[in-house]
Image: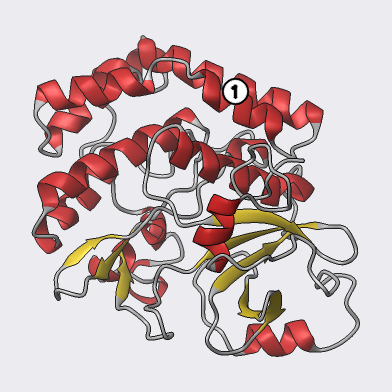
Amino acid sequence: MICSGCLKESMADFCQSCRKELFDRKSVSCDLSFDSPYNDHTDIFSENTKKISISGVQVKYSLKLDGDTLQLTDRGGEFILKPIPVGTFQNLNQAPANEHLTMQIARQVYKLSIPPNALIRFRDGSQAYIVRRFDRRVGGEKLQQEDFAQLAQMSSESHGQNYKYDLSYEEIAGLIRQYIPTYLIELEKFFKVILFNYLFGNGDAHLKNFSVIRTEHGDYTLTPMYDLLCTKLHSPNESDLALDLFKEGFPPTFEAVGFYTHPDFLEFGQAIGIRKSRVERILKSFTEPVSLALQLIDASLLDSEIKSIYKSIYLDRLSRMKL
């Protein structure tokens, strides 16, 4: 049996480590007690989604633990539930497994800060992705969190419908320097997630997919990373990255080959304020194939054909980043 959290061998739905992180050691099943919103004929989903406010295009729901059972809730939610999305993109039935796999690779292979997450099933058998909320204290008090669209004071009303895509990653780094006292540490975290998104085909990491959160000491830090998935599986013709790396557009090396390569990321890391030696060290860790990443892809619940496509995207981006 495979753990529905970390994808490692387990004697139960969740290994002891995932039970601890996700459910405070409670024995929770990966099978929900209710159908997906597409097969449920009651009003529990409509009532739930009316009363929560979670940003993003995909419909999301709020869950909490009732004993050792996950239940929909309209207050005091501990988890975000994301069912298979509806739309015109490709392979949407693979989206929950895609996000779960990508988040696990980010955490286990590249040591990015990622909230505990898992892949679960509705009663009708369809997949869903859950992630534990990181914007709540023990007891339910909400922590102050702002995404980078809010920090930049950008909205659809002030900047048009595409406002989430109007800045560059270099400009986001400038906001990190402006708002986070420990920006030298946070800039390295930011640089790593940009590399990760490129490596695993996430072309939709826009302004609202990066946030800061207020700590107990009253200052700000980057939140754990969220909404990491290989969007190339669902939208093959999209851009490699949601935003340009540089404020001033594409560098000559990009213009020469039509995509970002090693010199571009080396220049970008230094442009946002990271020492060259550190940039080189980080790049080295992202440009070497990692067997654990391939093992996690094989262990995931993606369909076999989709696993092959996912691997090919990863290996292609590796080759680009070595150029």
Number of marks in the rendered image: 1
Query: At 63% from the left edge and 70% from the top edge, which residue is drawn?
Result: 60
Q: Secondary structure at mark 1?
A: helix
**Observer able to see residue 216:** yes
Q: Which residue is mark 1?
A: 294
Q: Residue at x 68, y 74 (%)?
A: 68
Q: Quadrant of the N terminus?
A: top right
Looking at the image, residue 101 lies above or below residue 267: below
227 or 119: nearer the viewer: 119
From the top left corner, tell me how far across and down residue 320 is, in percent.
43, 15
Query: In terms of image quadrants, where is residue 141?
Result: bottom left
Assign the C terminus to one quadrant of the image: top left
Image position of 13 with respect to 163: above or below:
above
Q: Which is nearer the eye, 50 or 64? A: 64
- The type of residue carrying mark 1 is Leu
Quadrant housing residue 135: bottom left
Q: Quadrant of residue 72?
A: bottom right
Seen at 53% across and 18% down, the residue is: 291
- Residue 273 pos. (x, y %): 10, 38
